[in-house]
Image (cartoon, rainbow, N blue to C red):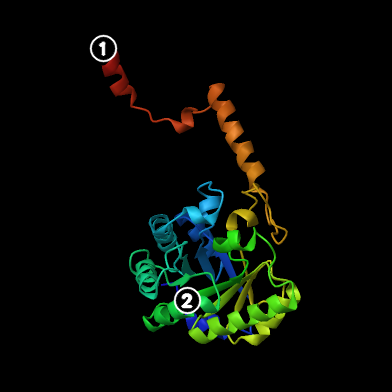
């Protein structure tokens, strides 16, 4: 039986090896990521934009997130599965946060949850950890708060903002987060944050000094081009291959090439003769 990546293993990786994290939204992607040896699979609320076609991440709730997290959990036998807590599933109260985090663990079979924010959500994180729920933090550009930031902008560009990021990271680590996502932060600031905490930092647009990296799987594979952030590296361009394959399928159907004899089911000559006599 495949051994699942655990919280102690993630913590022990800091300073020893780089960690890998990738978004996944469905069963087949989870299977492929597991074969690739990815450490953590984040069922991100980016599901709203990448898979469901919404304009932002605010448009998904617990129903969608639990549904997709469970699908990923079925496909991943090695990678740690992290459910991303959607907008307004944890902000209103500590009780709400713990109950919804518990649903990710119980109903969606997640191994951990992720939520956005710094010191202001420490009470929620402490309560989750005390309830036995592993928590990944997320600071810097937090998409659920994009309206407050004035859009999707790089964070921590001033000395004062950088100081707040470091303090937020320290608060999250002290509250019990086993790792912290740093999004859209200048590389030098992300390095300072990484050095300031004892838990691994996972960068996305935060430079190479982070303890690990996370990207959206559709960006990695070149399957989503509505917008491509600067920090994305496309390791394949599968959108062209997919369009080529689908176009060929359409053409062969129209031309009568598909399905061919090899794709069809036949009856015996004896049964065919019986049908011919009837």
Residue plotted at (53% across, 56% down): 57
Pick whichever, 189 or 106, lies toward us: 189
- In the picture provided, is 179 more to the left or to the right than 192? left
- Label 1–label 2 contact, CB within 8 A: no
Question: Looking at the picture, how far across and down is residue 41, in whole percent?
Answer: 51, 66
The secondary element bearing badge 1 is classed as helix
Q: Residue at x 49, y 76 (%)?
A: 121
- Rate crowding at label 2 as few (under 14), some (14 to 19) or many (20 or more) other CA atoms within 10 Å: many
| Residue farthest along the left direction in this orientation | 278
Looking at the picture, how far across and down is residue 85, in whole percent? 46, 65
Q: Residue furthest top?
A: 277
x and y, in percent, of residue 126 in the image = 44, 82
Would you name the residue on which mark 1 appears?
A: 277
Name the quadrant containing residue 241. top right
Give me the disc on residue 168: none
User: Taking 84 as reference, is 21 left or right?
Assistant: right
Q: How many marks?
A: 2
Residue 96 x %, y %? 37, 70
Instruction: Mark 1 vs mark 2: give the one in front.
Output: 2
The one of 258 and 46 positioned closer to us in this rendering: 46
Give the quadrant of the C terminus.
top left
CA separation in Å, label 1 and label 2: 71 Å
Residue linked to disc 2:
135
Q: Secondary structure at mark 2?
A: strand
Looking at the rendered image, the quarter that the N terminus falls into is bottom left
The one nearer the camera, 160 or 37, is 160
Q: Is residue 102 left or right of residue 43?
A: left
Camera sees residue 9 = yes
Q: Earlier in the sequence, mark 1 or mark 2?
A: 2
Question: Residue 17, can we see it?
Answer: no
């Amino acid at each position: 039986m495949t051994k699942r990546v655990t919280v102690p293993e993630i913590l022990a990786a800091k300073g020893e090896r780089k960690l890998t994290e990738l978004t996944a939204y469905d069963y087949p992607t989870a299977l492929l990521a597991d074969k690739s040896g990815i450490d953590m699979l984040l069922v991100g609320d980016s599901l709203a934009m990448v898979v469901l076609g919404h304009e932002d991440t605010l448009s998904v709730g617990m129903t969608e997130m639990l549904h997709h997290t469970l699908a990923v959990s079925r496909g991943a036998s090695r990678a740690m599965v992290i459910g991303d807590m959607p907008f307004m599933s944890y902000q209103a109260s500590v009780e709400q946060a713990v109950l919804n985090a518990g649903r990710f663990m119980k109903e969606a079979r997640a191994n951990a949850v992720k939520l956005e924010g710094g010191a202001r959500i420490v009470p929620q994180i402490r309560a989750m950890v005390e309830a036995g729920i592993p928590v990944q933090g997320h600071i810097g550009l937090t998409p659920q708060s994009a309206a407050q930031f004035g859009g999707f902008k790089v964070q921590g560009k001033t000395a004062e903002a950088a100081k707040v990021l470091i303090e937020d990271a320290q608060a999250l680590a002290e509250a019990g987060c086993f790792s912290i996502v740093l999004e859209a932060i200048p590389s030098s600031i992300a390095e300072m944050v990484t050095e300031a905490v004892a838990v691994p930092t996972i960068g996305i647009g935060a430079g190479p000094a982070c303890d690990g990296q996370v990207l959206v799987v559709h960006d990695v594979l070149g399957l989503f081009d509505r917008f491509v952030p600067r920090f994305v590296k496309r390791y394949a361009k599968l959108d062209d291959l997919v369009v080529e394959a689908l176009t060929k399928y359409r053409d062969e159907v129209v031309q009568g090439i598909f399905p061919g004899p090899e794709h069809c089911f036949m009856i015996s000559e004896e049964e065919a003769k019986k049908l011919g006599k009837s």
